Image (cartoon, rainbow, N blue to C red):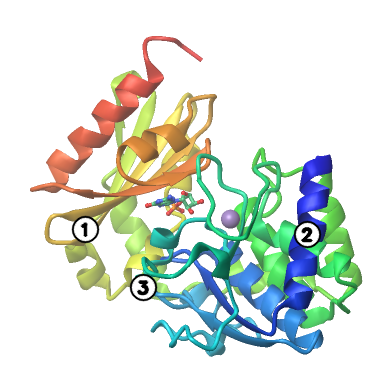
Amino acid sequence: MKTIKKTIAEVARELEGAANILILSHENPDGDAIGSSIGLALGLREFGKNVVLANSTGVPERISWLEGAKEFVTQLPPLRGFDTILLLDCAERERTGFDLSGVPEERFISIDHHPNTVGVGRKVLIDTQAAATGELVLEILLEMAVRVDAKIATALYVALHTDTGGFNYSNTSRMTHMSASILIDRGVDPAAVHKHLFGNERFERVALLGKVLSTLTMELDGRVATCVVTMEMLDEVGASPEDSDDFVNYPRSIRGVEVAALLKEREEGVFRVSLRANTGVNLSLVAKKLGGGGHKKAAGATITATSLEEAKKIILASLEEALGGAAS
Ligand code: 5GP
Ligand code: MN
């Protein structure tokens, strides 16, 4: 904990010394990637910094109402002008979906909370105890004595809300609630945020849910539940790939299920898998072996396979190995 506090102070000092900052986050961003990026960008501007926001896949519709969401560019701007490139909610160049291979390490600073990640930059802040990157961003802004206004606070609250499943997952800590309390104090309206996030569904998304739930299967003696999303289903109801982002919570909610897997066909032969654990199995390692990554209880990967069935077999084989024979 002490070293994290020290690193937060060090990152704050680095940012105080920077002038032109590019903020990047992981591709297929979630509320934490986008919320922490916006929160930090607005905060750094209060401090007089020039800040540009980019994300290779852009802002998902669910959080497009956040102030600052329209600012994101999806092409990498020319890097010459930036003395600092921040990686948020990821700590590796590849995760951004941009080609950053030739950029010197000293130009980067990474701020993340994912385990099993190396970290790139002249400063690396990886705190796996933090429920969200937004929690770390808040600490940095407070350390810099930035005036956290309602816009910044709302972006960071969305970050916390997203990564903790509305303050419900096991990563929710006293610290998370303390951070939320600070953010509410600075002007967040929690009910309004919840309504934006979960009370504002598009018809197409709920229609897609109906199709996806009809694919529910139980595998490995009921220890694993799966659902699939095909491109055909998206077409049939006019939904977009991101519409299924949190559907994995339905198979996860079934009694006795240890791991839920949502398999999403992205293009011919390319599948994304979202994995969620209810027990101690380490999905971060499972996903890493599949070429992806994430947290112990929430991880994902992109898999190439000739068919959905083959992709499913690959995932189930990995899960069988990870779950072993041990009952939890
Ligand atoms: P989701 O299932 O929501 O896409 O991802 C769950 C978690 O795993 C998130 O924290 C996400 O950042 C991480 N994750 C998902 N896919 C990948 C991937 O391909 N590589 C890495 N390193 N992390 C991933
Ligand atoms: Mn996160």
Q: Earlier in the sequence, mark 3 or mark 2?
A: 2
Q: Is residue 221 left or right of residue 42?
A: left
Given contact means CB atoms under 8 Å apart, are the residues at marks 3 and 1 in contact?
no
Q: Is residue 137 left or right of residue 79?
A: right
Q: Is mark 3 within 8 Å of ligand 1?
A: no
| In the rendered image, the vertical position of residue 2 relative to residue 45, given as above or below | above
Q: What crowding class fits label 2: few (fewer than 14 Cα within 10 Å), some (14-19), or many (20 or more)?
A: some
| In the rendered image, the vertical position of residue 228 relative to residue 193, given as above or below | above
Point 81% across, 80% down: residue: 150
What amino acid is labelled 3 in the image? Glu
Point 38% across, 39% down: residue: 288
Quadrant position of residue 111: bottom right
Work out how far the residue at label 3 is from the one at label 2, CA to CA, in angstroms: 46 Å
Percent of width and height locating residue 284: 46, 37
Q: Earlier in the sequence, mark 1 or mark 2?
A: 2
Q: Which mark is residue 204?
A: 3
Q: Is mark 2 within 8 Å of ligand 2?
A: no
Query: In front of the other: label 3 or label 1?
Result: 1
Residue closest to the eye, 233 or 311: 311
What amino acid is labelled 2 in the image? Glu
The residue beneath circle 1 is 230
Percent of width and height locating residue 287: 38, 39
Work out how far the residue at label 3 is from the one at label 1, CA to CA, in angstroms: 14 Å
Q: Which mark is residue 10?
A: 2
Mark 2 element type: helix
Point 51% across, 84% down: residue: 72
